[in-house]
Each structure stands twice: as C-alpha cells, then as structure tokens.
Image: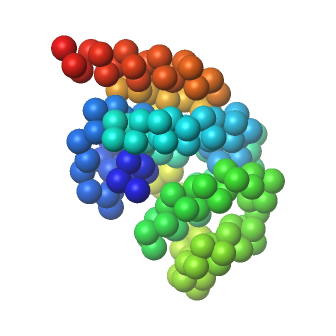
Amino acid sequence: SSRRRHTRFRNVTGVQTCALPISIAEFSDFECPYCGGLFPTLQKIEATYKEKVRIVYRQFPLNAIHPRAEKAAEASLCANEQGKFWQMHDAMFGDQAHLEVADLKSKAAALSLNAEAFATCLDSGKHAAAIRDSIVEGSKAGIDGTPAMFINGRFLGGNQPYAEIEKIIEDELVRLAK
C-alpha cells in the first residue's frame, strides 16, 4: 500500500515517495504485547485517514525482554525483499504467540513467499545490522520502550487509544491548512 512504509534508516527503502500530509513513524517490536494492542488502532487510523496518513515502521526489538523479536524483525525485512513487508507485519502482529523461526518460515509460506529465499535470508542474519542501526536511531531520539510514535515529529509513547492519535492528526491537519 502506498500509505504504509517501513524503513531501516532515515531514508525509506524500496518504496515510491508519497506526499501525504501526516507521517506516523512507529518504533515497534513484533513480540511486544503493547505494540500488538496498538496494531488494530493504527489499522483504524489508516482506514479513517486513507489519503492523509502514511505509516513508517521502524524496527525497535526489545531483545532483553522479547527473545523472538529480533528474528521477527529480520523476517519482516526478508519478506520485504519479496515485496511483502506489510503482509508479514500483519501476520506477525495477528499471531504474536508464534514467532519462533519455524513459525516465521510457516508464515512466509502462507504468504506465498519463495520459501528457500526467505529461509536463506532469515538464517543468514543479513538484516541484523540494519535492525541494530534502527535501534540506535530510536535510542538517539529518546525512545526506550515500545510502541513509540512520532506523528509529524510529535512524540507519543505507549499503546495510545485512537482518540489520542486522532487528536494529534487533526491538530496537524489544521496546522497544515493554515
């Protein structure tokens, strides 16, 4: 979808530029229960603000407390190599109890990814450095937990209710209209 993006660094990779007025950069962890709780809220935000909001996913696995988060983050980037980042993202948040490597490979197969290419990518750990860079970038921005969002640069931490996110979006839309 043109409204959803993921990024490893400051620059978005593999996606066309889109000029939507509201950008939500979400630093998240696929194993984090609070991130899982935010997932349906952000889906609702996307549905409500179709032509106004883009979501940029930033990897921020909390490895100390979520032992499967790192490999899940790698799986999302391996899926991205085959053009299915958001499908894998949704599959993992839709079933957070099953994030072992074998589960991730099963999810990839269910999404019709090339299983051999996905397994090679995941087993290699080739995206681990990019994930570490994303964690460093988030830490420099003051993030120490997930989920954490920047809505047009305005920080909002935790599993926030729809109304809180909506309030900032509406305020930003008013500011942009001036």
Model colouring: rainbow
Q: Quadrant of residue 98?
A: bottom right
Q: Position of residue 26 (x, y in %)?
A: 49, 37
Quadrant containing the N terminus is bottom left
The residue furthest front is 48
Task: Decide: is 94 above or below 114.
Answer: above
Q: How many marks?
A: 0
Residue at image point 75% right, 68% down: 103
Residue at image point 52% right, 46% down: 59
Q: Can the viewer see residue 136?
A: no
Task: Decide: is 156 above or below 112.
Answer: above
Residue at image point 38% right, 48% down: 3
Q: Is residue 95 left or right of residue 165?
A: right
Which is more toward the observer, 177 or 118?
177
Quadrant containing the C terminus is top left
Q: Position of residue 39 (x, y in %)?
A: 62, 41
Residue at image point 31% right, 58% down: 15
Q: Can the viewer see residue 101?
A: yes
Q: Is residue 152 left or right of residue 26?
A: left
The residue furthest right is 97
Q: Quadrant of residue 162?
A: top right
Task: Decide: is 175 above or below 144.
Answer: above
Q: Position of residue 167 (x, y in %)?
A: 47, 17
Q: Quadrant of residue 53?
A: top left
Q: Position of residue 114 (x, y in %)?
A: 54, 83
The residue furthest left is 178
